[in-house]
Structure formats: C-alpha cells, structure tokens
Image: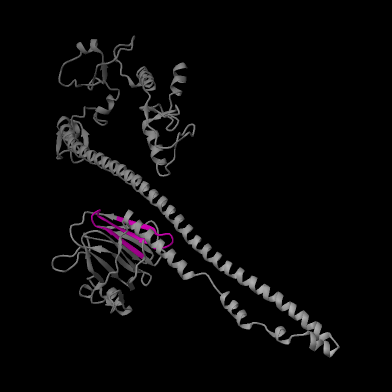
Amino acid sequence: MASADLKKGLDCSICLNIYTDPVTLRCGHSFCRLCIERVLNSQEVSGRYSCPECREEFEEQPRLQKNIALHNIVENLLGAQPEEEETRVFCTYCVDDSIPAVKSCLLCEASLCDKHLKVHSKSPEHVLCDPTTSLGNRKCSVHKKLLEYYCTEDSACICASCSAGEHQGHQVETVAEASEKRKTKLGDFMTEVIKEKQEAEKTVQSLQEHRRKVKEDAAGVTKKVTTIFRDLRRRLDTLERRVLGDISWQSEGVSHTCDFDIQQLEMKVEELSRKIHQIEELCNMTDPLTVLQESDTGDLCDTEEGHFEDIQLHGRGNLDVAGISHILYTGLSAIMRGLNGEMYIPKPESLSLNVKTANSYLHISDDKKIASISPLNHQKLISEKIGPCPEVFSCQAFSSGQHYWEVDVGGSDDWRVGMCYPKNTGVFYFDRESWYLRRSGKEYRVIEQGERKLPHSVSASRIRIYLDYEAGVISFYELEIPIRHLHTFTAKFTHPLHGVLYVGKGRLQIFEEVQRM
C-alpha cells in the first residue's frame, strides 16, 4: 500500500504517468522534460510563459533544471518492482518449487532449469530455445510437428509434412535461413531508418538554429524599430511645437492688430454717438435763431470716411496657412529623409511588359502596363487546348537589391503573378524556376515545383510582389487595410529575375504609380 501511494505521488500532472527525466521549474513544480517542453513551446507564440500547475508567469522561457533527487527515486522504485508472475517461465519438472527455467524444449514442450537441463536428451530432434510459454505456437497446428521450414510463396512457417503436402513445389527454406534473410532485410531497412532519423534530427537542428536566428533578428529589428519610433516621436513633438508655435504667433499678431483697430473704431463710434446726440438736440429746437447760432454744421457733418475704410481693410488679416503648410511639409520631409537613412525602404518599381515575350493570344496595351485576353481567345484556349500559357514578362530584370511592384488583379479570376528566370535563348522558365501566386476561380495557390493551396482567400484587388535578391526572398502581399502577408518563397537565386503575368481570363494591370511601403 505504501509503495502504491509513493508511486501515485510520482505521476506527472501533464501526462499522468510516472515521471520520465523529471525537471523542475523555478516555482518548484516538476514535470517530465518532454511534457513541459511541449507546453512551453506552445506558449512561445503568445510570448507569455506560465507553470501548468500554479500558473506562475515568467518573463522569458524558463530554464529547466533536472530534478536529480526525484530522478533517483523513480529509478529506484521502478528497479524494485517485482516481475509479474505470469511473465516469468518456470521449470516444468520442479513441481514443489518455482525454479526459473533456463531453456525450453520444443519437442518436449517443456521448460527446464539448470538441473533438469543436464539430464535432458541431447538428440537433434530435441530443439532448445530461450525460455518461453508459447511452445504450442512452434509446432504445426495440423501435423503437430516442429515448424522447421519457411514457405516464401505463402510467407508461412511450415513443418516437414506441410512441405511434402500442400506446399509441395513451393520455394521452401529452413527457418534459420529465412530468419537470416529477414534479419538482413531488416538490417538494410534499419540502415535506411537510421539515415532518415539522422536527416530528421539534422532538419530539427537546422530548424532550431533558424528559429534561434529569427529570434535574434527579431530582437535586433525590434530594438531598432523601437529606437526609430522613439526618435520619430521626439522629432514629431518638436515639429508639432514649432508648427503650433507659428500658428499661435500668427494668431496673436492678427489678434493684436484687430484689438488696436477695434479700439480705434470704438473711439470713432463714441464720437459719432456724441455728434448724433447734438444733432438730435438741434433738430428738436423750435427757435430758428438758436439752431443757426449754436451749431457748426461743418464739424457735425465731418465723418472721416477715408480713415474708416483704411481700418476695415487693415482688419482683414488672416493666418498664413500656406506658410504653415510649408513648415509642416518641410519638417515631415526632413523626418522621412532621416528615417530612410536609419532603415532602408525598398525602391518601388513600375514595370513595363515586354511585348516580344507575350503569348499571341494576349493583347498588350500601348503603355505596356495592361495584359488582357479577349473572350473569344479565352474560348479558343479552352476548346483547342492550347499548349503555351498566355503569359508575358517584364522588360526589367533584377539581379540584386530589394524591390517591389504591384498588380491590379481585380479584372480576372484566372491569373498568376510572380517572378521567373530567363534562359539564354530569351525564352522563359515557368516551372521549376519560377515563383508565383495563382488564382483559379475561388481558389488561391502558391506554386514552386508543385502547388499548395492558401489557407485563406484574397479579398483585395491589388497584389504586391516583394523581392530581396540577396536574401533569396519573394513575398506576396494583399494591399488591404492593413496590408496582409500572403506567402513567402525562399530560394538561392542564380539568374536575373523578371516579373511575369499569366492571364487566363480578363485582364491584369501593372500600376503606374505604386504605394510606398
């Protein structure tokens, strides 16, 4: 009972079996090494690691420490487990005691201990083997004779009577010979399996190295991008203060001018009000002599109209929006130039189509940007099963650097876009040495020495093809909001690459002006 309780306490909480190569996390909980590695690898996508037992979180993937004490306890417990009685073979003739057998006789169908083996018959028909409880399986079920032969035609072990009977005329070998041949085949197969295992381990090692490198690259790029954004925020804040300061300065200038003019006009209004009051008093007088003697018509009727008009014109000052826009544009341009220096932005390409490489069923526009196929030619392609693909290639070729170009695919539901090698003859590869994205009806596939279906459809009508020649990368993007990555090919490029369009229906158009990444 104590042993059972101890064994129960040695179960891994993930696989619920006894620990295998137990390791411990920083929180103190132990697991099988393989079990916890699988859990941590699954958490790697989110970047948040935690203990499956207590849910304690770790900032980075925790280091696994071998639990030596627990490992020794498990080994001692398993080593102390008694063998199950039914799996042990005992001497047939030792009826009073359970004495382990050392050999079994196939003829006698009995197992023998050392003592009974010494007095056992040494004649050839008494065939000895390792101790076994399945002695009956070593004799023919029909003739009750030893299975001494192997029929290669029926792949069956047979006795001498079977060989002379129903298996007569068949290719027959002794069991030993057949066993050796089988071992040879198994050895050859094992060699292949070992080789395959080594290749798999090599691939695993390469993937682990690639994963490590990608993580290092991601960390470096993350640090660089973080620095760039921090610098951008600083520069934008400086530019914002400068532009807002200029707006405030202009606004204050106009405001001061308006305040002065308002003050002058208010004084004018007050003076005019006084004159209106005087005129009203004179108009209300009944004595003509008083009106004529106490009033100076010239002073009362002088309104100084010219000065008032000057104030009105002067009060029309506005913000210099054009000047503010110039400051903003100049500042943003300077920031972008600085950004280009800190992180390389690929050059956008506006490709043109090479009419000489166009299939005769295709029509190329005068500006060499549009490839289209008429409905009539499309029907011919289907009915006549035309061999050559209706494709066309770009005039430009790329043998270095980073570039991207964009295609409008909204005018067709049967197309391929990508890049390929040219031959020395001027004819282009379109199979093993081409990389492209394909649409056929509602299906989207990527093709490189075979086709593979994309897990999702493409909703946008604009596709971007990105090339990094030195890195051996061709990537496809869907230009929706936000831009979505579709697929990336990796290869070692050995020849210049041309853009390629395949038009099975409708039209494709290369954009004259591409959108900056």
Number of numbered discs present? Answer: 0
- Prevalent SS, magenta region: strand
Residue 360: quadrant of the picture: bottom left
Residue 361: quadrant of the picture: bottom left
Q: Position of residue 165 (x, y in %)?
A: 18, 36
Q: Position of residue 382 (x, y in %)?
A: 29, 73
Q: Nearer the viewer, residue 484 or 297?
A: 297
Does 132 appear above or below 168?
above
Residue 502: quadrant of the picture: bottom left
Q: Is residue 171 left or right of residue 504?
A: left
Q: What range is drawn magenta here?
A: 463-488
Q: Residue at the bottom extreme? A: 288
The residue at 47%/20% (across/down) is: 5
Q: Is residue 119 visible?
A: no
Q: Residue at the right extreme? A: 286
Q: Quadrant of the C terminus?
A: bottom left
Q: Nearer the viewer, residue 146 or 354?
A: 354
Whether the magenta-drawn stretch holds residue 382 is answered as no
Q: Is residue 352 left or right of residue 125?
A: right
Does 494 appear above or below 11?
below
Q: Nearer the viewer, residue 476 or 389?
A: 476
Q: Position of residue 39 (x, y in %)?
A: 41, 37
Q: Is residue 164 left or right of residue 307?
A: left
Q: Is residue 481 visible?
A: yes
The residue at 27%/24% (across/down) is: 135
Q: Position of residue 272 (x, y in %)?
A: 71, 78
Does 206 appear above or below 177?
below
Colour logic:
one colour
